[in-house]
Image: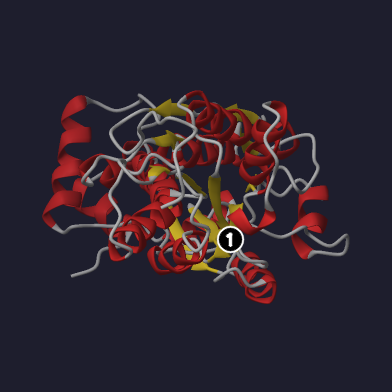
């Protein structure tokens, strides 16, 4: 039996206003006995508020749209977990959309989410938004939006950034300090979520230490286990390679398989470093040295700032920069830099 708020009020012998105040934890012009009686009726009949009706009154749907480029990616799934943790505690629901790295799909989802009257949107995008993009127009009209986009869309508010360059640079200098001079790099393919800062750090670290950047040491693949596996096979064609810096932990896991298939050992023959700090990285054999970035916190703060924008000034949503942490484990070894080719 689905009750209306009026029927609950009639059963409890109170006004609709009193029931509404009790359900929303507001007001105090009623006794504790009245509050308990109303909540017992609500519990007995498993009453749920009609969010459509509530939306008409409050102009809030208690729904947030979120678009990510790949829902299967471990990093983005952790961001989603952070978003859910904050929003669910506040009674919000998420409409999660997977753009599959497609600009067209992303634009379609933005239009659909706005059509469904979401209160705000969290957009993780590899794309630069066009000037006539619907979301830019809505942002100008104070619609709450938080971007997770590595800073490629310039704005003064609502942008979450990660200090990727510093983390990747630390990883590279660690390899160099351990005697490695022939270091491969696994990066993303064109059109994928671009890891520009990580590739720049790779190049900068080599150049700063007087080591020639050899383009054949840099190979591209999808940011997946399979992508890492295929890219690592290509890198390993360079017999001088003693270490591989991977664009993310998934690629590093794929690289493990490629290294083993080549009859090589980690780290005795090839040292490996990942990026992301996924939980699984510590359970590999050997455990993966990596750069941790706080994906859960990024999602949590994205949700926190968005809700603040929904209930306040959407153009005062703060920016935030997240730091990375270099995590040394067992997949890297010091070498004699005069070591011969394999």
Q: Is residue 342 left or right of residue 113?
A: left
For the point 77% across and 48% down, the residue is 153
Check the image and report above or below for 261 versus 84: below
In percent of the image, x 32 and y 55: which residue is there?
Answer: 256
- In the rendered view, tell whether residue 31 sits above or below residue 9: above
Q: What is the quadrant of residue 13 in the picture?
A: top left
Instruction: Look at mark 1 in the image and give the residue it sits on.
Output: 219
In the rendered view of the protein, which quadrant contains the N terminus? bottom left
Residue 255, quarter of the rendered image: bottom left
Q: Does 50 sit above or below residue 37? A: below
**Residue drawn at x 67%, y 35% as measured from the top left:** 211
Front position in the image: 6 or 171: 171
Q: Which quadrant holds residue 32?
A: top left
Q: Nearer the viewer, residue 132 or 285?
A: 285
Q: Picture coordinates of residue 151 (x, y %)?
A: 72, 42
Residue 61 image offset from top left, x and y in percent:
52, 56
Quick one: 11 or 258, which is closer to the camera? 258
Residue 312 visible in image: no
Q: Secondary structure at mark 1?
A: strand
């Amino acid at each position: 039996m689905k009750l209306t708020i009026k029927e609950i009020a009639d059963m409890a012998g109170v006004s609709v206003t009193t029931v509404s105040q009790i359900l929303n934890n507001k007001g105090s012009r009623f006794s504790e006995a009245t509050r308990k009686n109303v909540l017992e009726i609500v519990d007995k009949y498993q009453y749920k508020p009609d969010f459509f009706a509530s939306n008409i009154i409050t102009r809030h749907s208690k729904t947030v749209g979120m678009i990510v480029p790949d829902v299967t990616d471990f990093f983005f799934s952790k961001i989603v977990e952070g978003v859910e943790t904050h929003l669910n505690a506040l009674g919000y629901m998420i409409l999660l959309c997977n753009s599959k790295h497609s600009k067209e799909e992303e634009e379609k989802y933005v239009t659909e989410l706005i059509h469904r009257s979401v209160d705000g949107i969290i957009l993780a995008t590899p794309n630069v938004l066009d000037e006539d993009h619907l979301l830019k127009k809505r942002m100008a009209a104070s619609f709450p939006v938080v971007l997770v986009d590595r800073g490629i869309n310039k704005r003064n508010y609502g942008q979450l950034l990660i200090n990727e360059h510093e983390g990747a640079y630390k990883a590279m200098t660690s390899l160099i300090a351990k005697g490695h001079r022939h270091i491969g790099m696994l990066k993303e393919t064109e059109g994928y979520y671009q890891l520009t800062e990580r590739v720049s750090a790779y190049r900068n670290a080599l150049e700063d230490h007087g080591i020639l950047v050899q383009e054949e040491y840099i190979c591209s693949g999808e940011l997946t286990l399979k992508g890492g596996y295929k890219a690592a096979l290509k890198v390993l064609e360079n017999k001088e390679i003693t270490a591989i810096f991977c664009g993310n932990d998934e690629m590093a896991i794929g690289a493990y398989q490629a290294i083993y298939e080549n009859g090589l050992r980690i780290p005795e023959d090839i040292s490996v470093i990942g990026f992301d700090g996924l939980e699984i990285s510590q359970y590999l054999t050997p455990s993966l040295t990596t750069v941790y970035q706080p994906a859960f916190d990024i999602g949590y703060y994205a949700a926190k700032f968005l809700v603040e924008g929904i209930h306040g000034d959407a153009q005062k949503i703060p920016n935030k920069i997240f730091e990375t942490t270099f995590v040394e484990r067992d997949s890297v070894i010091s070498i004699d830099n005069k070591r011969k080719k394999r």
